[in-house]
Image (spheres, rainbow, N blue to C red):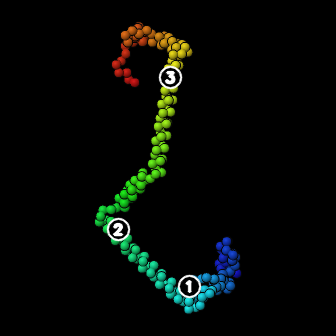
Amino acid sequence: MDPASQDINLNSPNKGLGVERSDNLSDVPVEGAVGTSANPAAPGLTDEEAEELHIELTKVEEEINTLRQVLSAKERHASELKRKLGLSPLNELRQNLTKSWQDVQTSNAYKKTQETLSQAGQKTSAALTTVGTAITKRLGDMRNSATFKSFEDKMGNLKYKVVGPKENGEGASSPTDTIPTQKNPPF
């Protein structure tokens, strides 16, 4: 066996066998193969009936091809008319979307959903207003509490120690007051 005539496809059922084998599959008839010279009649049909059906099938296929050609010509004519009228695919899409949106807005489901969402928005707004009012009241109560007053006094004392007493917006003498300040500092 010549190595050049061996099948090198490792997945082949003829792996390692020579090509000169005479029992290849080209002589085996295939069931239901299309294009055989003698079309046997289908079970229950005579040869004449099968021949009539083949003729009718050929005619129907020709009609289908003719209708496809007519449809194609009509589509070209329609697109030409649309072009002359200034109707572009984008304009058609825009009109379709506008019409669809109007249809959606007039539907009962949309109206019910819109009403429900509106009510939910109103309830949410009322709840947030209530929460805001409660927080404002709580902060006011906290500011008037003894703990906050004590904290405020301590912060006032700290400010007095850092900045010093001020009258009419002018600071009293402090170490920083003796240094002249620039009107426009570099940073």
Residue shown at 37% from the left, 74% from the top? 73
Looking at the picture, does residue 90 appear above or below residue 10? Answer: above
The quarter holding residue 48 reads bottom right
Distance from Cα at disc 3 to Cα at disc 1: 92 Å
x and y percentages locating residue 121 in the rendered image: 47, 39
Name the outermost residue toward the bottom.
48
Which residue is nearer to you in this view: 7 or 34?
A: 34
State the quadrant of the N terminus.
bottom right
The 10 Å Cα crowd at callout 1, few under 14, some 14 to 19, many 20 or more, is: few
Looking at the picture, does residue 16 appear above or below residue 150? Answer: below
Asked whether, in this view, residue 50 is left or right of residue 109, the answer is: right
x and y percentages locating residue 90 in the rendered image: 37, 59
Q: Secondary structure at mark 1?
A: loop
Eye-nearest disc, 1 or 2? 2
Residue shown at 40% from the left, 74% from the top? 71
Q: Secondary structure at mark 3?
A: helix
Asked whether, in this view, residue 122 is left or right of residue 16, the answer is: left
Q: Can the viewer see residue 151? A: no
x and y percentages locating residue 91 in the rendered image: 35, 58
Q: Are marks 1 and 2 in contact (CB under 8 Å)?
A: no
Question: Disc 2 marks which amino acid?
Answer: Ser
- Residue 35 is marked as 1
- Residue 137 is marked as 3
The 10 Å Cα crowd at callout 2, few under 14, some 14 to 19, many 20 or more, is: some
- Residue 79 is marked as 2
